[in-house]
Each structure stands twice: as C-alpha cells, then as structure tokens.
C-alpha cells in the first residue's frame, strides 16, 4: 500500500515538472522592407515530424516590362526537411523558372508555356540545415499583360531545432508584395502580407476563385406576394499547384472554413503500410477543420501513374485507410470526402499482372479535369535551392530593377 501511495506521489511530482506542450508559432518580420534588407522568419514549438508548408501568393506588376526577376542572398536554414516538395506556378507567362548558385555551381530550371501557365514540380532529396549563396526566380510575361500571378508552395517533414529563425536578404527588386501562408500539419499558422518598397499592388489573386453571382433576378411575375429569389450555390474548385489533385464542392456545403481559405498543399506521407506504395505524394486539404455536407468530390490525375490497382487513402487517427473510389473518365480517380485532412494516391506494392484493377465505386460529383504540371528531374544541388526558392517568394517582387 505504501509503495502504491509513493508511486502516486512521485508521478504527481513528475507531472508538475513536465512543461505543457507549446503551441506552434511562426512570424515574419519586418512587415515592410527596402531592397537589401534582411527578412527573418521566426518559429517556435515546431516539433520534429511535423509537416511544414509555405504557400506564397503574389501579383507581380510587369507593366511595360519584358521580364521579371528577383534574388536572395545568404539564406540560412536552421533545420532540415525530409522528402520535401516545391511547386512553382506563374501566369500569364511564356516561360518561367528558378536559378540557384552555390560556389562555382549554377543550377537552372526553365519551363516554356504553351497555355500561358508555367508549373514546375520538384521532388527534392532530404535537405540538411545550411546556407545557400544565391537563388533567383525569373520569367517572361505574355505580351501586353500588366501583372503576373506567382504562387509557390513548399512542404516537407521538419527535422531539427524546435525554435529558431530563417534569415535572408533580397536584392534586385524595388517594390512588391505577397500573401504568405504558413501551415503545420495542414493547419494555417501564419497568414499575412509582406511589402517590399512602396508597392501599389498589395493584394494577390488567390485560389480558389468562386464565380461571381449571376445577373439580377427577373423579379416576380403576375400579382400576389413577391417571392425572394434563392441564389443557386456557387461552385468552388480548388487544385494543387502541380495539377494532380482537384477538390470540387459548393459554397454552402462548406463548414469550418471560408471558401477562399481552402487550399490543397502537397505533403509527405508517413506511416504508410509496408504492403502499400505511394504513387503521387500526399495532399492536405486545408484547413483540416473544414467539413463538406454534402460531401465534396476529390480526384487525382492518373497521367503518368504506373500502377494496376491505384486507390485513394486517407490518414486518420495515426493510420491510413482506403477510401472507396471510382474512375472519372480515363485519367482521373475520384472519391467523395466529407472533411479536410491528408489524402494520397496509393497502390499495393506487389501486384500480379492479372489482378482486378477496378477500384470500389461510389457516387461522386462530376470532376473538372486539370492538366498535370510537368515535373523536372531532381538534382542534389537543386535541393537546397528549392528551400530558398520557397522563402524568396515570400516577398515576390512587383517590378524588376533596371
């Protein structure tokens, strides 16, 4: 009896000594800078194994310009990232890309657009903490346009100090702004605007975009009481930047988030069963608190997928489970989902040639096909550049310096 009482006392004392779990905090300062100033991204409470993501949405003023460019110097990252992904989207442009310089080595990725949109998806090797000398983003706008939408999304599994600061300086730009969104495990932690110089354009075009209400109602017909017309629900479509995943719903079906706050962030899956293989990474519907009633339609683009039994899975309560799915056309696999969270396209690791390839079918809403973005070939030196590229876009330029 004495032993049991002693154990309870010791446990109580230990509980008093253990500090409470701190909330994740991420801040970016200062809120406005001039060219060459240092930008600091401070963070605390960021545990190892957390999925860290940055999404930057910028409207770049290119009136009278034939190109745009910006660069960062001496970018210091205090933590590493496992299995990171970086995706860049720019439109309307004829080409866009990223260039990185480290010592005497220069890495450059450029993509030419046939549709007015450039999307570069880069899978990176594990990135250790360190410093990159130079990173530059660049592009050529379509002729006659006044502004270019630039969106960059970067994510990975954080490994390193739980608190610290990322620092870098900017040169080659004069005025600019960006909507910066930082997410941890699919939840928005920071959502703010950073200004460079004295820009006149401060609000980027964000995704998703819902169509405006239709024209005025036709009014009542005949006599009697006047009826107030009921506006039809507006369709809300959100896609990942690489074009692989699309979510489609209606505005009045969304709870726990505003339609304009919905995002699909590419992430890195963990805890995947040994008998499964990941085909296209995992994707977080953010905010994770968002719910859909009726259920939303989630679809994956199968272009380039080499698997006989693809299926959609969701990560819930520390485990992956299969979501009933069906084919939509020849190139998309779709499922209905009722909440945010992490989803992935997977397949069984060992599949015989003669196995049944038909997924379980459920009712789904019609899908809007999104062309998958081209994926560039990974390179070791490019890995560090990807991290810095994500940070640089946190303050996208408004105008190239002469």
Image (cartoon, rainbow, N blue to C red):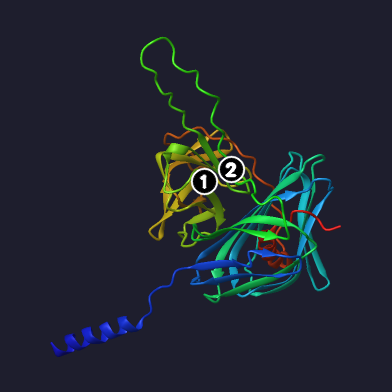
* Residue found at the very far top of the displayed protein: 222
**Among the 4 quarters of the image, the one containing residue 338:** top left
Q: Is residue 31 left or right of residue 52?
A: right
- Circle 2 or circle 1, nearest the eye: 2
Of residues 258 and 81, the one nearer the viewer is 258
| Up/down of 185 relative to 5, above or below | above
Give me the disc on residue 310: 1
Q: Nearer the viewer, residue 241 or 107?
A: 241
Tell me the residue at 72%/57% (across/down): 198
Locate residue 172 relative to residue 212 in the image: left or right. right
Q: Quadrant of the C terminus?
A: bottom right
Under tag 2, what secondary structure? Answer: loop
Q: Give the image location of residue 299, x and y in percent.
A: 52, 41
Percent x, y of residue 113: 76, 43
**Would residue 320 appear left or right of 116 to someone viewing this image?**
left
Query: In the figure, residue 317 lies in which quadrant?
Result: bottom left
**Residues packed near mark 2 inside 10 Å, few (<14), some (14 to 19) or many (20 plus):** many
Residue 111 visible from this viewpoint? no
Q: Decide: marks 2, 1 in contact (CB < 8 A)?
A: yes
For residue 11, what is the image quadrant?
bottom left
- The residue indicated by pointer 2 is 302
What residue is at 40 percent from the left and 61 percent from the top? Answer: 318
Residues 236 and 363: in front is 236
Helix, strand or loop at mark 1 = loop
Please state, as top left, top right, bottom left or bottom right, where the N terminus lies in the image.
bottom left
Pick whichever, 232 or 277, lies toward us: 232
Task: Please state the horizontal and vertical placement of residue 144, each as a whole percent of the image.
Answer: 81, 39
């Amino acid at each position: 009896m004495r032993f049991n009482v002693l154990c309870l006392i010791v446990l109580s004392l230990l509980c008093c000594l253990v500090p409470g779990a701190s909330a994740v905090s991420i801040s970016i300062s200062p809120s406005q800078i001039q060219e060459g100033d240092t930008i600091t991204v401070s963070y605390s409470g960021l545990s190892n194994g957390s999925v860290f993501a940055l999404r930057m949405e910028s409207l770049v003023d290119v009136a009278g310009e034939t190109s745009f460019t910006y660069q960062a110097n001496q970018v210091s990252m205090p933590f590493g990232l496992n299995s990171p992904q970086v995706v860049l989207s720019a439109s309307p442009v004829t080409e866009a890309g990223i260039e990185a310089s480290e010592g005497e080595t220069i890495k450059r990725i450029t993509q030419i657009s046939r549709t007015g949109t450039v999307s570069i998806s880069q899978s990176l090797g594990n990135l250790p903490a360190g410093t990159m000398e130079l990173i530059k983003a660049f592009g050529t706008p379509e002729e006659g346009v006044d502004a270019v939408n630039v969106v960059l999304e970067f994510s990975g599994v954080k490994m390193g100090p739980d608190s610290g600061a990322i620092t870098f300086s900017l040169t080659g730009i004069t005025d600019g702004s960006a909507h910066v969104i930082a997410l941890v495990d699919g939840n928005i932690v920071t959502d703010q605007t950073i200004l460079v110089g004295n820009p006149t354009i401060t609000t980027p075009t964000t995704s998703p975009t819902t169509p405006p209400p239709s024209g005025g109602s036709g009014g009542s017909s005949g006599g009697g009481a006047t009826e107030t017309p009921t506006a039809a629900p507006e369709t809300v479509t959100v896609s990942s930047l690489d074009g692989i995943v699309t979510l489609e719903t209606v505005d009045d079906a969304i709870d726990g988030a505003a339609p304009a706050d919905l995002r699909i962030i590419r992430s890195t899956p963990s805890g995947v069963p040994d008998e499964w293989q990941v085909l296209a990474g995992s994707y977080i519907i953010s905010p994770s608190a968002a719910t859909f009633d009726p259920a939303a339609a989630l679809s994956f683009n199968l272009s380039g997928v080499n698997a006989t039994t693809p299926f959609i899975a969701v990560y819930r309560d520390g485990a992956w489970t299969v979501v009933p799915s069906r084919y939509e056309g020849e190139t998309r696999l779709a499922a209905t989902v009722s909440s945010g969270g992490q989803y992935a396209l997977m397949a069984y690791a060992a599949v015989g040639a003669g196995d049944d390839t038909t997924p379980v079918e459920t009712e789904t809403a019609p899908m809007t096909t999104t062309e998958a973005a081209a994926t560039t070939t990974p390179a070791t030196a490019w890995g560090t550049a990807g991290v810095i590229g994500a940070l640089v876009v946190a303050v996208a330029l408004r105008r190239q310096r002469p």
